[in-house]
Image (spheres, grey):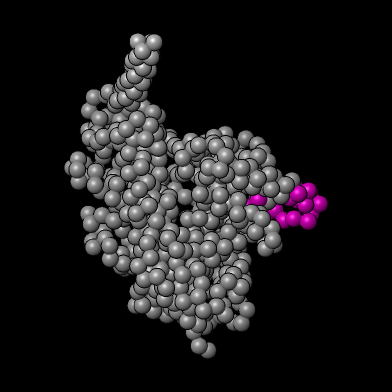
Amino acid sequence: MEHFYLSLLLLFVSFVTLSLFLVFYNHRSQYNFPNLPPGKPGLPYVGETLDFLSTGWQGRPEKFVFDRIAKFSSEVFKTNIVGKPAVVLAGAAGNKFLFSNENKLVVAWWPDSVNKIFPFTQNSSSVDESRRMRKLLPQFLKAYIGIMDSIAERHFASGWEKKQEVLVFPLAKNYTFWLACRLFVSVEDPSHIAKFAAPFNLVASGIFSVPLDLPGTPFRKAIRASNFIRAELLNIIRQRKVDLGTGKASVTQDILSHMLTISDEAGRFMTELDIADKILGLLIGGHDTASAACTFIVKFLSELPHVYDGVYKEQIEIAKFKRSGELLNWDDIQKMKYSWNVACEVMRLAPPLQGGFREAINDFIFNGFFIPKGWKLYWSANSTHKSGQYFSEPEKFDPSRFEGGGPAPYTFVPFGGGPRMCPGKEYARLEILVFMHHLVKRFRFEKLIPDEKIVVDPMPIPAKGLPVRLFPHKG
């Protein structure tokens, strides 16, 4: 009997050994190409993903890239993140190459978690969609400024005024979400907005989570939340079609009406599901990134009194020429040059978008290295934003970097670049500047946790939500 159990044990050990050998062999065989960039693939399945994520959790996402640039003496290196063989193209040259070769050598790629949460995003060309949205949004922007101003007025009146202390990050999320709901689908009722808010937070936290579709996981919660939101949006879309048909709604009132009434070059209209998915993407994109930027604007203005004074002077100069009840307009926004330079410097030091993935659709050579078809490519905003090669004293806050011609091309990339540059860039500029206007004309403020930790997962977030004490201006 002992021999029998010993034989079983040996068989089991042999099976495990063979399985591990096959796993490691298959993992390593993915890297059997000549002249690949330097780098290490890490462990099977896991690769270097934990190291990639942990530097963000520690508040230093640039460390993953800079450590490897130093180790391999190369701005191009191979790795394995999110379970895929990948090449990181750091620096301005890497950004330029990826942004200039969209749909030629590379296409956009998202981790499985994103594709499962947004299942309809694969129905159409990402380049076509970005182009369509870039054409669509500017038509509304000038009309949006007054609406943004009135919503900001109500937001600060209800969430900030008559309070000694506030938690900035949740308030910033409330502001950007309120704006997005009103401007994209004309949802303005607080109870209706609140119905959306919690599911949206679940979607945002699950997008870049480990794609384990099991009860209780962030990924499962995000899938269920996105399905709930999509169903709600379909109800809004169907009611809007009725309202447009009866004249109760206007073709120009928001993005949704425009999507329902505009066809492509072939005369095709978007389906209800496609519109729901595009609106879902816009709401996510116009919500989390801008709220992170607004939060860090408060952080840096509280730390840098001389920068605050410059923003305050500019905004008060605009405010003093406004009649009582008169809303901000396009000309006012164009006068906020210093304020926007400050916002840009905030996004350089704390980019809401840390980087992005592409996929090689052909074999190609970059910087003398072979990049195989099917491999993932990652560009990092911090590889230029935090580099002394592109910005002198990169850790120093200096809005003057954006005066005149501003930074060199492909070095300042908080919105990405090329055909896939964020179509909401100008929209974000408006909502951020309107936020700054209302913030500084009402308050000075100071951080309650001077050394509050910053966590990047995947966007920068103050670990405690950035509590501040408010000091209302007198008079």
User: Is 464 drawn above or below residue 318 in the view shown?
Assistant: above
Asked whether, in this view, residue 44 is left or right of residue 73, the answer is: right
Tell me the residue at 50%/75% (across/down).
165
Tell me the residue at 50%/82% (across/down).
472
Tell me the residue at 57%/63% (across/down).
174
Magenta run includes residue 247 = yes
Q: Is residue 341 visible?
A: no
Give the magenta range. Answer: 239-256
Tell me the residue at 32%/24% (across/down).
24
User: Is 96 drawn above or below residue 362 in the view shown?
Assistant: below
Asked whether, in this view, residue 61 is left or right of residue 256, the answer is: left
Residue 334 appears at what percent x and percent y? 47, 68
Asked whether, in this view, residue 54 is left or right of residue 236, the answer is: left
Which corner quadrant holds the N terminus? top left
The front one of 332 and 460 is: 460
Residue 293 picture quarter: bottom left
Residue 56 appears at what percent x and percent y? 36, 51
